[in-house]
Amino acid sequence: MAKADYYETLGVTRNDSEEQIRSAFRKKAMDYHPDRNKKPGAEDMFKEINEAYQVLSDPQKRAQYDRFGHAGVTGGSTSDRPFDGFDVFGGFGDIFDSFFGESTGRRANQPQRGEDLQQKLVLKFEEAVFGVNKTLDINRVEQCNSCSGNGAEPGSKVNTCGTCNGNGQVRRTQRSLFGQFSQVSGCPSCSGKGTVIESSCRTCRGNGVERRNRTTEVSIPAGIQSGMQIRITGQGNVGRNNGPNGNLYLEVDVLGHDVFTRQESDLFYKLTLSMTDAALGVELEVPTLEGQLEKLKVPQGTQPGEEFRVKGKGVPHINSNRRGDLRIIANLDIPKHLTKDQRKLLQELDRSFKQGNK
């Protein structure tokens, strides 16, 4: 069954501000709270309202939902504080505890670290071996330029919340069979921010953030391999309330090469030899990844699969001056077609070998 649209669940539009969404949520949540509404289906509707509000009240999640729909916010519970069901005092957890603040009284205006971003980085073989500087395009959440992140329309007032007097928290006292309990939670009037916006910013709809495309220069170290991850500190989504930005993580994928293969810090090159070169020995030149040629002396009697090494012509070790080796693997080229003269010469050579072994 397809999931309901979050905006429809709360009875709001995509252009409504954070204040309007919060107001609609309060009304809906009170109408369907299981302690107040005993009708069949009220509990399920209450959970849907919770899920919708958890996404639409978070600027980053809301931006993902607006762009990708439900797929943009799946991969786990959409709620930071999932619906817990019955507690030890009977009934469902208090509505404002569930949605307007933790029972520990954490304030929404506390510094919050921005979300991390993950991006795939495809490198050419040579770029991974020798390192490279890359210009990356990043789509991330940044502070709104129009309101400087406070969510208010320029020129409008940001007032101290009259319910919590700017503390972002309220204390409530409840009575139960076990006595009287006091609990501190986020203020329901200002969502724990301590301030109330008179008029929401039209650019960011009161969220204080907006999504932008940015470019950034990244230095890729020499010797990196497929599967490795590069962390670019502070290039993720913006933090809230002066919290630090998240990080950007690059997942490295290295393309193959037409001539060389790689194993850790060593490069491999397949050297094809004729029968006569392998038998008699030969001096020749082999390519390197830098484009230069290295002289190699192949001894007589070289066998298929025999290996030769050129020291220091492999892959650099990351953050080190050391390099691996170029490992050259001998491969024998056996002719598939022979002329009559060639066949006669090989037959004479074969008889010579057999007589010599007697």
Image (spheres, helix red, strand yellow):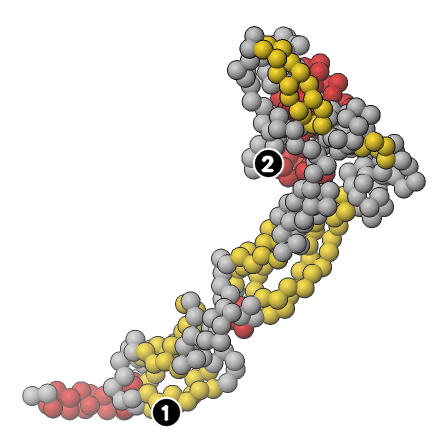
* Residue 287 place in picture, x, y as percent: 46, 82
Which badge, 1 or 2, is on the more N-terminal residue?
2
Identify the residue position indicated by label 2 in the image.
74
Q: Quadrant of the N terminus?
A: top right
When the figure is inspected, residue 266 is found, relative to residue 137, above or below; the finding is below
Decide which of 14, 218 is in the foreground and name it. 218
Residue 179 in view? yes
Decide which of 314, 268 is in the foreground and name it. 314
Query: Which residue is drawn at the image coordinates 52% and 80% (left, top)?
Result: 290
* Residue 277 place in picture, x, y as percent: 31, 88
Q: Quadrant of the C terminus?
A: bottom left
Q: CA distance from mark 1 to mark 2?
A: 62 Å
Query: Which residue is drawn at the image coordinates 61% and 13% (left, top)?
Result: 180
Q: Is label 1 in a helix, a strand or a loop?
A: strand
Residue 162 lies in quadrant: top right
Amino acid found under the numbered disc labelled 2: Thr
Identify the residue position indicated by label 1 in the image.
283
Amino acid found under the numbered disc labelled 1: Glu
